[in-house]
Image: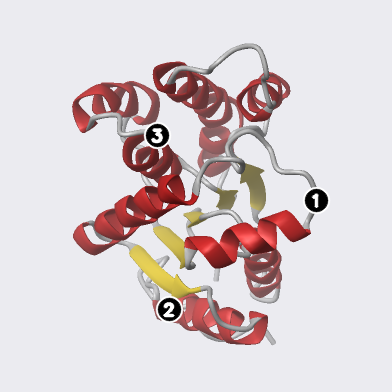
């Protein structure tokens, strides 16, 4: 049976294991006859990738205003939605995203302290009626996540923020997850196998096409 196109998002702090989760979900979907279009934010188009570099570069001689960071994020998101996500969904392809709008609400809203009154008009303009069918938020203790991120190598501009920034970001993530639909919180403090088991359970229980996708195709 052909499944209707769906939009799945993976969210989380640095070191939460989003890349590993993306690979696991991609494999899970392929086993069921669904090859997703995979995206990342910020990025995913040539212009959006350039904006990603601007956001993440460490700058010794210029402070980046929180509002500037917010606008760059939504500019990159607009490019990705217009040129990749919407066309893929319209063509009947599933989309699997490494970060989406929840990131801006958590990082720029929670971490930077920008108000919903400032963010929401941008959300309305950029997203329109687009919303994820399922968001998996990988929740991790920020101290653990940052230690994992440091073990990968040099930290980018956002990863170099103080622990308190990521604690505020996490609090905003959890608030959104607790108050909005179609968001599943995954305990990412556990082993990779345990995290994958939680993700699989969430995917199997989510009525992504009006019925469950729990069984792989024979």
Residue 198 pos. (x, y %): 50, 82
Please tell me whether mark 2 or mark 3 is closer to you in this view. 3
3 or 1: tag closer to the N-terminus? 3
Left or right of 176? Residue 43 is right
Please tell me whether mark 2 or mark 1 is closer to you in this view. 1
Residue 110 pos. (x, y %): 33, 42
| Residue under label 3 | 108
Left or right of 32? Residue 82 is left
Which one is in front, 204 or 198? Answer: 198
The local crowd at label 2, few if under 14, some if 14 to 19, many if 20 or more residues have their Cα within 10 Å, is: few
- Visual colour scheme: secondary structure
Compared to residue 30, the image places residue 77 above or below, namely above
Residue 135 pos. (x, y %): 42, 59
> Residue at 56% across / 23% down in the picture?
79
| Residue under label 2 | 212
> Residue at 46% across / 64% down in the picture?
136
Q: Quadrant of the rendered structure where residue 120 is?
A: top left
Q: Quadrant of the rendered structure where residue 17 is?
A: bottom right
The local crowd at label 3, few if under 14, some if 14 to 19, many if 20 or more residues have their Cα within 10 Å, is: many
Residue 38 pos. (x, y %): 66, 49
Secondary structure at badge 3 equals: helix
Which residue, as the protein is rendered here, is positioned at the far right? 153
| Residue under label 1 | 153
Is residue 35 among what the camera can see? Answer: no
């Amino acid at each position: 049976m052909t499944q209707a196109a769906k939009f799945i998002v993976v969210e989380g702090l640095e070191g939460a294991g989003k890349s590993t989760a993306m690979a696991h979900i991609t494999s899970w979907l392929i086993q069921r006859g669904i090859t997703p279009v995979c995206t990342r934010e910020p990025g995913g188009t040539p212009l959006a990738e350039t904006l990603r570099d601007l956001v993440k570069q460490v700058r010794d001689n210029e402070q980046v205003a929180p509002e500037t960071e917010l606008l760059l994020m939504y500019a990159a998101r607009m490019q990705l939605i217009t040129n990749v996500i919407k066309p893929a969904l319209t063509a009947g392809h599933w989309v699997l995203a490494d970060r989406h709008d929840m990131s801006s609400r958590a990082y720029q809203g929670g971490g930077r302290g920008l108000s919903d009154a400032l963010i929401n008009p941008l959300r309305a303009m950029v997203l329109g009626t687009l919303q994820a069918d399922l968001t998996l938020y990988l929740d991790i203790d920020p101290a653990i996540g940052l230690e994992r991120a440091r073990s990968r190598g040099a930290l980018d501009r956002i990863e170099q923020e103080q622990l308190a920034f990521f604690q505020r970001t996490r609090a905003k993530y959890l608030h959104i997850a607790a108050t909005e639909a179609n968001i599943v919180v995954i305990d990412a403090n556990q082993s990779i196998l345990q995290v994958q088991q939680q993700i699989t359970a969430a995917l199997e229980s989510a009525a992504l096409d009006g019925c469950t996708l729990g069984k792989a195709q024979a």
